[in-house]
Image: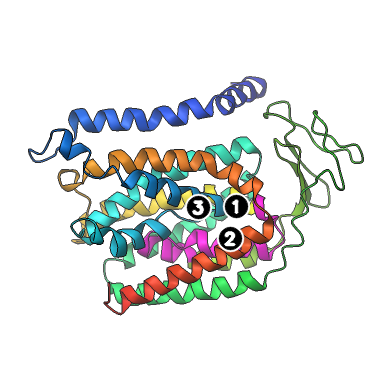
Amino acid sequence: MNIDSYSRLQKSFLRHQHLFVLIAPVVFVTAVLLWAPTDGAGGLDHWLEYWWLFPVFLTGATIVNTVGISGSALFVPFLIFIFPQFAQPLSPTTIVKVGLISEAFGLSSSAVAFVQYGLVDRRLALTLVGGSVPFVIAGALLSFIIPEMVFHSLLGLALLASAYLLFRADLGHEGAGSSDDSEAVADGGSLNTDLPNDAGKLGPAGVRTDDNGTVTRVDREGDDYTYTRGGYLRRFGNYSIGGLFQGLAGFGVGELGIISMLGTNVPVRVAIGTNHIVVALTAVLASLVHVFGGGLVGGHSLSLATTPWNMVVFTVPATVIGGQIAPYVSNALETDTIKNFVGVLFTVISVALFLMAAGIA
């Protein structure tokens, strides 16, 4: 396949990505209703028992995908603290299954949407994923021997530190072009600046890297962002620690990773979009190690027969839709609003983790 054919195929996929992405949960739910093992349970009452999870997971998925963190960062505390107030408590392995299945669909949906929007630096994302892989694997294997209290406490401390750094972060480097300083025109250029435009992208979108390493990116709305990819060592430190936690608890790489990108002057919306690719790929890797690694060493493993399918038939569509909404919410919000919201979110999650570590949950 030549470059022109690949470009046309990519543009066609991105143009119709809403259709492809939304078909996935329909196929999933249909397959569940037809073939999922339910231990004899069935009927309309069974399948509609957890309908109320749809708005909860829709809201949660929109929040986490807007700020570029792992879905489990909200879903796990919700299933531990709030869900038992309305239904029977879930076992830890069941919580892992519901979180992983829901997060996989939501992250994939949102990652494609951010790519379409022009807010993903794929070169930066692939570098970060490559550096995180060994740490994600190590963290997932350590999860079989480290007490839950230990890694809940460590992750809580890490998120508190991240919240502190985020509140202190100067996001004045955001610099997306607007009508105030650079009115974008239809071809991706500007009335004042020659901006890149890629015919293979949707709308006025494109990216150019100068000889000195300066990246100029234009999203599909015509907003432009200028930054460099420098600071790899600092990002590697954060993503390695985050990768360990991603393997241990199912989240961490997104929460710590977003801080490192903001700290190395990557514009916040580009950082959020790029972080989606990193979180999605490392989450899939962590899931595979948990599934197959647990069985090999005698640890926990995922069983299809005990999966609460009447829950995931609502959580999966909700996370997919939330993933599609997120780029528009991210683009509409002010930078300071996103920054402060993420900081508060990290603080709340860390408190929940400390409660879990203390055995209060």
Label 2 crowd (10 A; few <14 / some 14-19 / many >=20)? many
Q: Position of residue 34 (x, y in %)?
A: 20, 27
| Residue type (three-letter) at the residue carrying disc 2 | Ile
Disc nearest the viewer among 1 and 3: 3
Q: Residue furthest bottom?
A: 358
Distance from label 2 to label 3 (Cα)? 15 Å
Q: Give yes or no for residue 71 being in the magenta stretch.
A: no
- Real-space Cα separation, disc 1 to disc 3, in angstroms: 12 Å
The reply to whether callout 2 and callout 3 are in contact (CB within 8 Å) is: no
Mark sitting on residue 272: 1
Residue at the right extreme, as displayed: 192
Q: Secondary structure at mark 3?
A: helix
**Which quarter shows the N terminus?**
top right
- Residue identifier under label 3: 63
Is 268 covered by the magenta stretch? Answer: yes
Question: What residue is shown at x 46% (from left), y 56% (from top)?
Answer: 133
Q: Residue 258, labelled with which disc?
A: 2
Residues drawn in magenta: 242-269
Q: Earlier in the sequence, mark 2 or mark 1?
A: 2
Which amino acid type is shown beneath numbered disc 3?
Answer: Ile
From what the image shows, is residue 28 above or below residue 354? above
User: Residue 10's quadrant in the figure?
Assistant: top right
Front in this rendered view, residue 349 or 218: 349
The local secondary structure at tag 2 comes to helix
Provide residue 270's location: percent of width, then percent of height.
66, 50
Residue 207 screen position, x and y as percent: 74, 40
Q: CB of mark 2 within 8 Å of CB of mark 1?
A: yes
